[in-house]
Image (spheres, grey):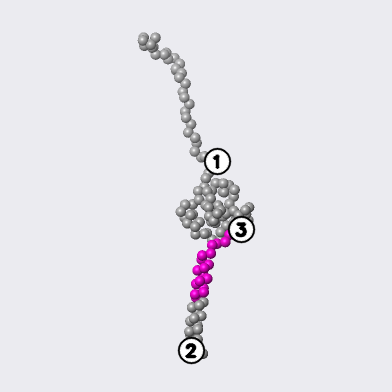
Amino acid sequence: MSRVNWTTMLRTLIVAVTLGATVAVTAACGIEVAAVYSSDGYPSEAYIATTEPVYFEGHAAYWYGDRWYYQVGDRWAHYNREPPALYARRMQAPPQRRAYGPSSARPAVRPAARPAVRPAGRAAAPRPADQR
């Protein structure tokens, strides 16, 4: 083979490998992250009861411990990487938490009505003559 043929073949091979790698990387970027089932580190019942869920892919998701968790049957799962839609929701406004239990503010107490008692030693004012 001549030197021109080797050069052309080498260039074609480099272009093919580069194009293949680019397609593979681009395709991998579009793949949604898979769920990983977790046996520990999942949100507690108290956290679930007081946090507003974010609905994503047909289930309630909770932002907890720097991950999005959701329940599948009786097991908890989380995303390895944060899906773009959940990231956008978290950046828009973090999930709201509600506080239940006694409030820290004291309730306003109305002062009791004072009885109409005259002080001792004072006589009642005389009535006018027309009211007798």
What residue is rendered at 46% in x and 23% in y? 114
Mark 1 Cα-neighbour bin, 10 Å: few <14, some 14–19, many ≥20? few
What residue is rendered at 48% in x and 84% in y? 8
Q: Is residue 103 visible?
A: yes
Mark 3–mark 1 distance (CA, rounded to whole Å) = 32 Å
What is the magenta segment's predominant secondary structure? helix
Task: Determine the secondary structure under disc 2.
Answer: helix
Q: Is residue 20 magenta?
A: yes
Residue position for label 2 = 3
Q: Position of residue 14 (x, y in %)?
A: 50, 79
Q: Position of residue 126 (x, y in %)?
A: 39, 11
Q: Amino acid at mark 2?
A: Arg
In this view, the mark in front (1 or 2): 2
What residue is rendered at 48% in x and 31% in y? 109
Task: Determine the secondary structure under disc 3.
Answer: strand
Residue position for label 1 = 101
Residue range corresponding to the magenta coloring: 18-37
Mark 1–mark 2 distance (CA, rounded to whole Å) = 84 Å
Q: Earlier in the sequence, mark 3 or mark 2?
A: 2
Residue position for label 3 = 37
Farthest residue, direction front: 58
Task: Determine the secondary structure under disc 1.
Answer: loop
Q: Earlier in the sequence, mark 1 or mark 2?
A: 2
